[in-house]
Image (cartoon, grey):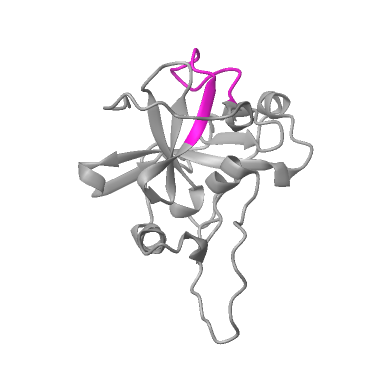
Amino acid sequence: MNQQNDEKCEHTEGDVLTFPKGLVGLPELRRWILVDMEPTLPMKWLVSLDKEGFRVPITDPGFFTETYSFEIDEGSQKIVQAGDVEDIVVMIISTVEDGGQRITGNLSAPLIVNVKNRNGVQCILESDVYGMRHEIDTLRFGEACQAYASGHPENVVGTAVDKAMSGQYDQETEPLEPDQEVELVDAR
């Protein structure tokens, strides 16, 4: 997706996610950053640093299914070089259609990123369990969007995409008062 405006995304070298093999159909696009959407949503832009104005929406697999698991092939493991499974996050390239009325995700080709060295790879799953246009869980995603819109994104349990942006799953928040109740939306 090409951006409509000529905004320049400010970033540091530590923000860059490197996909040495690029993405499927885009092997020349290897350097990317994650950028918040406007308004801020539990979805981010994956913005190419190699092709000006090119970006794709990505989000957490937890918004599509409660159970999402697969094995990372040996070649992908070598690229990502994760020492521990906790260092890996999974992100799903999404398609937003009809002004947000329909959102699907390509669960058959997830993005895997090592949050420590910032290396990533797009895995192509050979199983037919996950499709290219898996419908988002509108209730779960809608609740998360409401938390963001009300100015309380801290009420959404940190997602993999947040972890890839900051290297942490959960954002630090102010301690709650004993009588203060908060509803958390789990997107992991």
Name of the residue lying farthest toward the top: 28
The spot of residue 39 in percent (x, y) is 34, 49
Residue 112's quadrant in the figure? top right
Name of the residue lying farthest toward the right: 83
**Which sits in the foreground, 7 or 59?**
7
**Which sits in the foreground, 181 or 21?**
181
State whether the magenta stretch is mostly helix, strand or loop. Answer: loop
Q: Determine if residue 78 is in view.
A: yes
What are the residue bounds of the magenta stretch?
18-34
Which residue corresponds to the image point at 71% horizontal and 27% vertical from the top-left?
Answer: 74
The spot of residue 170 in percent (x, y) is 61, 57
Q: Answer with left or right where residue 155 lies relative to residue 73.
A: left
**Which sits in the foreground, 63 or 71?**
63
Residue 54's quadrant in the figure? top left
Q: Answer with left or right where residue 186 lies relative to residue 56.
A: right
The spot of residue 10 in percent (x, y) is 49, 29
* Residue 52, magenta (yes or no): no
* Residue 27, magenta (yes or no): yes
Q: Is residue 3 above or below residue 104?
A: above
Count of numbered labels shown in the rendering: 0
- The C terminus: image quadrant: bottom right
Residue 47's quadrant in the figure? top left
Q: Is residue 17 above or below residue 166?
A: above
Which residue corresponds to the image point at 41% horizontal and 26% vertical from the top-left?
Answer: 8
Which residue corresponds to the image point at 36% horizontal and 22% vertical from the top-left?
Answer: 53
